[in-house]
Amino acid sequence: MTTIPLVAVVGNPNAGKSALFNMLTGARQKVGNYPGVTVERKSGRLSLADGRPVELVDLPGAYSLDPSSPDEEVTRDVVIGRQQGERLPDALLIVLDATNLDNHLRFALQLIGLGLPTVVALNMVDLATRDGLTINIARLSEELGVPVIETVAVRRRGIDSLKEALSLAVTAERRARAPDEDFTAVQRRARAIARASVLGESAGNRTTGLIDRIALHPVAGPIIFALIMFFIFQAVFAWSEAPVGWLEGAVAALQGAAVDAMPDTFLRSMIVDGVLGGVGAVVVFLPQILILFLFILLLEATGYMVRAAFLMDRLMARVGLSGHAFIPLLSSFACAVPGIMATRTIEDPKHRLTTILIAPLMTCSARLPVYAVIIGAFIPAADVGSGIGLQGLVLFGLYLAGIVGALSAAAILRRTVAKGSHQSFMMEMPKYQLPSARDVAIGLWQRAAIFLKRAGTIILVSTIILWALLSFPQPKEGETTLDSSIAGKLASGLETVVRPIGFNHEIALALIPAMAAREVAVSALATAYSIESDDEAQTEQSLIERLRGRWSLPTALAFLAWFVFAPQCLSTIAVTRRETNGWKWPAFMLAYLFGLAYLAAGTTYWLAIAAGL
């Protein structure tokens, strides 16, 4: 059996490496972890000009072959053939930022020195031209001793030339390895090659510089960032109203069709109340999740997200963190699992531990269905100002509460269990650029696939189990399903603990399966109310409509406060154990976050009662 050639895509962060990888592989990608470590491995299939397949692996961005983080260590181990379970690449595809040639050539020279067949993709040449840079490609190729191809990944420019160069590289023999040079010597060579290759240069990067004068201003910058975040949360509700309604109608139609087509049996109850009622109650919030990720992907693609990290550095320094923690914490808005894994780029162990422990406080996408249900049921869809919706304002407040809670927890942790010195923050600022519609579409498709996979696995299984526990034994005369069933009796025990903070029997019931994943709380409530209702009423009423008649406003607000802090996700606990190599810190995380959740919910409930709500 012929082995498919392996090409490693490698380069500095912000060189456009992932955009180029997406351009070459499209949707033919697989995502997993390297054996033995929690560093993400993204690979994809490329067909060369002659039809031969090549496997591309997108390595984590690095600055040097002398690693300072687990990400850089994996990159080093792969390109030298030391990574467990990974064979030595047949060729390297080095991605350079044409607008920052001097800095990116340092790492490129180290990689070329390994002797592997190499192709250099000189990316973002359109931005270099915009900034007045004229690069002599032939001279650069001569100086480096490898082919150099001009590319613009976001516009698919240079793809054919790149495929031709890779066709030759994957069949070329490995050259003798160049002698290792110290950092100073490599830096000197990089500067010399950059000077020899750049024929003309403008006064500076005018566009990026002009924008950054405002975007990074100590006063205007944070205000702009806050306004962007506020607009995003307004859009999550305003833009998703119609598609959420369409999905709710589709779920209701499927339930009605199942009721009409099937006899009144346990199988029908499982399909209507369990599968459609439970899973459908979560799936309808897919538009809100995609809108949120659309904005996150756009901010990342334009280069603004790194500026946001820079802006946050001053604030985070006051609680003992630095801008290095911003990207992992930002990733946690999608899911705490990749956010915790992203802390591998943080060198200081105490700094990294603190970031891991507060990552679950970032409001992940799994909380969004919970927030959307409660806000939709109890917060009026009214405007509080010109174009400012009350529901979006409350959602923004919940996200803000998670951020404030995370920073407050960090300040305490950095002065107690994770005491240590402040770490300086250095990060390369990429140039501003227009996002690629293709890359954004791929990112949204991947996020939708992950969400729907969770709906079809964790949420589906949890919902069916809960349906079974709610269905047996059958209630006696004068009893309700929620009281007589196995699940109802388990909830009664938990209810004695959570009733002082305003939680009712149904909430106690929902908290148990929600430990698998936060959004299961929504499907659990939907399943419980579906079983208790008759089929006709169920198809006519949404979960939001049912909640309005059963919960008080103080209870609803307490439920929201609980989910701001509670770490209800087994995957988060599991990845924390892997990253900290033991159960000590996951146990600590569970204890302090559940304590915060109980305190926040109770305080919210009793303040709301005192205010007459």
Image (tube, grey):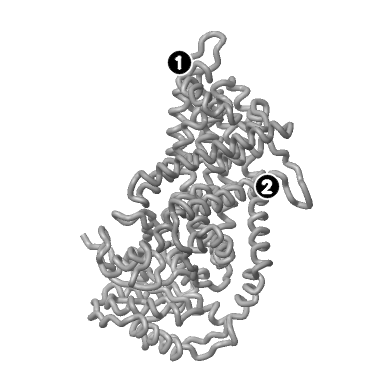
Q: Is residue 125 above or below residue 426?
A: below
In the rendering, which numbered label is found on residue 392? 2
Whether residue 138 can be seen here: no
Identify which amino acid the numbered label 2 is placed on: Gly
Q: Across the whole image, how many numbered discs are drawn on residues?
A: 2
How packed is label 2: few (under 14 Cα within 10 Å), some, or many (20 or more)? many
Q: Is residue 257 left or right of residue 189?
A: right
Compare residues 61 and 47 and report the one nearer the observer: 61
In the rendering, which numbered label is found on residue 543? none
Residue 82 image position (x, y, % from top left):
25, 65
Residue 374 image position (x, y, % from top left):
63, 37
Compare residues 591 and 403 and report the one nearer the observer: 591
Quadrant in which the C terminus appears: top right
Q: Which residue is mark 1?
A: 473
Quadrant in which the N terminus appears: bottom left
Q: Residue furthest left?
A: 1
**Which quadrant would residue 174 be assigned to in this image?**
bottom left
Identify which amino acid the numbered label 1 is placed on: Pro
**Which quadrant would residue 351 be assigned to in this image?**
bottom left
Residue at position x 50%, y 39% in the image: 594
Q: Earlier in the sequence, mark 2 or mark 1?
A: 2
Assign a secondary structure to mark 1. loop
Residue 257 image position (x, y, % from top left):
56, 28
